[in-house]
Image (cartoon, coloured by chain):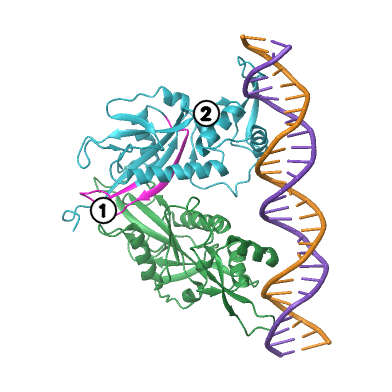
Chain colours: A green, B cyan, C orange, D purple
Amino acid sequence: MPHQLDAPTRLAVSTVIFTLRPGAAGRAVLWTPLVRRTREPQLGLWALPGGWLPVNEELEVAAARTLRATTGLAPKYLEQLYTFGEVNRSPDARVVSVVYWALVQSDEAARAAAGPNVRWVPADTLPGLAFDHNRIVEYALWRLRTKVEYTEIAHAFLGGTFTLAELREVYEAVLQRSLDPANFRRTMIASGRLRETGEFQAGAAHRPPKLYRYDPSATRTADDREPFQSERPAS
Amino acid sequence: MPHQLDAPTRLAVSTVIFTLRPGAAGRAVLWTPLVRRTREPQLGLWALPGGWLPVNEELEVAAARTLRATTGLAPKYLEQLYTFGEVNRSPDARVVSVVYWALVQSDEAARAAAGPNVRWVPADTLPGLAFDHNRIVEYALWRLRTKVEYTEIAHAFLGGTFTLAELREVYEAVLQRSLDPANFRRTMIASGRLRETGEFQAGAAHRPPKLYRYDPSATRTADDREPFQSERPAS
DNA sequence: ACAAAAGTGTTTCTCCTACACCCATGT
DNA sequence: ACATGGGTGTAGGAGAAACACTTTTGT
């Protein structure tokens, strides 16, 4: 009998947050913020940002709120990941967690506040987390990596304008492999989702690259769009 | 203030169930079972099978249980679809529904019990359902149709052995378009997931087709397998 | 001048599509 | 014999991958 008496099932919302930071071999690395637990159970362990769902708050709003509370940032991409509800995933009570995953702009995240109870770690080499949170992050990573290949979410790590080289570095970091710059360029242009700004990025010791802007209102039909993902404007 | 006092958020589990039935133009059609609501709110309206989540029951088990309660069947495929939690999706209380979708074997479903409170309807032309259930079924349909194209779930509509023509008819029904038999054969064989049984299906006025069996333990690496889908044996 | 990355051109390979054609059975 | 779907062969086209080559900047 794992649960006390007739304590009701509790509903939580958690969020796996990803950003990119410069890494060792010139390739960027995915990082994620964790929160130290300040209560039992699992007091002191690191866990995903989250909390109980308020009765009058939308799930997605709760996810964005906890994201803001731990990072000070707004998500550039936010999508429901999965709902975890195993009977014994928390030692005391039955807890069902609706988990979201989010991408935040990397240069903003670099300035994000950490503190004694908030810590950023590389997403591929996590410490032991509370509850089933290691498994959750692994699933979120899997989803990010597969989804980057067939959608246009990569730009969410970048600012309003970017060069194709910057965009390619995002893909290379997420997919963990090098991409041919020439073919990458053609693929991206062919997607029809990038607009030239007319500007160039100067200052480097080579030909100045064009700056592009992501344009969601492009080419594709409504048919192949996914129903419940949410693209959020930089607030 | 849409909700009474401090009534807590309630957690439900519902399931969208699909099977195939022979259709007009020789092409099979997707059907789904609905349940008549016997309580307020929305009393009398048709709704997805489901119910409140018992504190000690796994989410997936709850989904399989309600599936069995309404159809008398066991799912051949069962996967979490999405969690719907809009604050106002139910008029009285805040209800968060973890929704699963399932495929059941079509010849078994043909013998499934219906009754005054259980009714099977074509999934593409539903009546007006309770709550947000129309939207939920539409999403489940979308997921089924996209997932059939990149996974091997189609066999879940069929029995233990089947011909390639039968399998192709499943694809054609789900995707709502004709497929070239020659190319379909090659694609399926190339997937490495079908095993010849050595048997043939006799009785038709043409060359007897080979019978195949689905073999999940084949070829693919663990890398590209999806984490939380659940393939269930015919019980 | 030269290094370095931007950007273009071109060949090759692979997979998908269309469709012609032969095979084996029941009537 | 012949109709019907099972099953094989193959040519053509679209797109991905590999890589040579030209362009434009800072030093």
Quick one: B174 or A51, which is closer to the camera? B174
Q: Is residue B49 left or right of residue A118?
A: left
Q: Quick check: is B99 in the magenta stretch?
A: no
Q: Nearer the viewer, residue B46 or A140?
A: B46
Residue placed under numbered mark 1 in the picture: B88
Q: How far across and how far down the image is residue B154, in percent?
A: 53, 35
Q: Nearer the viewer, residue A106 or A1?
A: A106
Q: Label 1 is placed on what type of residue?
A: Asn
Given the image, what chain letter belongs to the residue carrying mark 1?
Answer: B
Query: Which residue is painted at 39% across and 39% down in the image?
Result: B16
Q: Quadrant of the N terminus of chain B?
A: bottom left
Q: Which residue reaches farthest left? A: B5
Q: How many marks?
A: 2
Q: Which residue lies under the disc numbered 2?
A: B158
Q: Secondary structure at mark 1?
A: loop
Q: Residue at x 65, y 80 (%)?
A: A208
Q: Which span of residues is magenta-colored?
A: B74-97
Pointers 1 and 2 within a single chain: yes
Q: Residues within 10 Å of mark 1 (few under 14, many from 20)?
A: some
Depicted B69 relative to depicted A103: above or below: above
Side of A189 where A18 appears, left or right = left
Q: Amino acid at mark 2?
A: Leu
